[in-house]
Amino acid sequence: MRKSYRVKTEADFQRVFNAGKSVANRCFVIYKLHKPQQKHFRVGLSVGKKVGHTAVMRNQIKRYIRQSLLEVKPQLPRDVDFLVIARKPATKLNMAQTKNNLMHVLRLAQLLPADEDQ
């Protein structure tokens, strides 16, 4: 993802975290905040040390999430900032399982159409 598609600053993270709505499944939590005048969506990723003990593991999870989001980028609404927070079970997922779990939680958050095929 290009830098313009990322929630980067601590203030932006806190704004979405405090004012946004959240949904979750077993592997991921999504916080979303609507921002009507925005040109495109922005996403922030959080994979803590409790989730992946090594930087290699945490970075792999983030790469899987970024790639999954890149594949559904045209279907995501443009007027939203959202955070993807990984939970511990995400460490055991391969790329396909990560994408399926992420698509599930994005549908729960109403960021993807519910009738979308996997």
Image: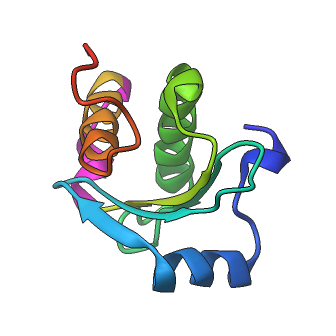
Query: Nearest the camera: 36 or 46?
Result: 36
Tell me if residue 86 comes above or below residue 67 in the rendering. Answer: below
Magenta-highlighted residues: 88-95
The colour scheme used here is rainbow
- Residue plotted at (69% across, 76% down): 12
Q: Quadrant of the C terminus?
A: top left
Query: What residue occupies the far right of the structure in this picture?
Result: 3
- Residue plotted at (64% across, 62% down): 35
Give left or right: position of 40 versus 94. right
Tell me if residue 117 comes above or below residue 113 in the rendering. Answer: above
Percent of width and height locating residue 83: 51, 61
- Tell whether position 29 is magenta: no
Percent of width and height locating residue 33: 52, 66
Q: Disc count in the image?
A: 0
- Tell whether position 90 is magenta: yes
Query: Nearest the camera: 110 or 5?
Result: 110
Query: What residue occupies the far top of the structure in this picture?
Result: 117
Give left or right: position of 88 versus 67. left
The majority secondary structure of the magenta stretch comes to helix
Percent of width and height locating residue 54: 49, 61
Query: Nearest the camera: 55 or 102?
Result: 102
Query: What residue occupies the far left of the structure in this picture?
Result: 26
Q: Quadrant of the N terminus?
A: top right
- Residue plotted at (26% across, 62% down): 23
- Residue plotted at (32% across, 34% down): 103
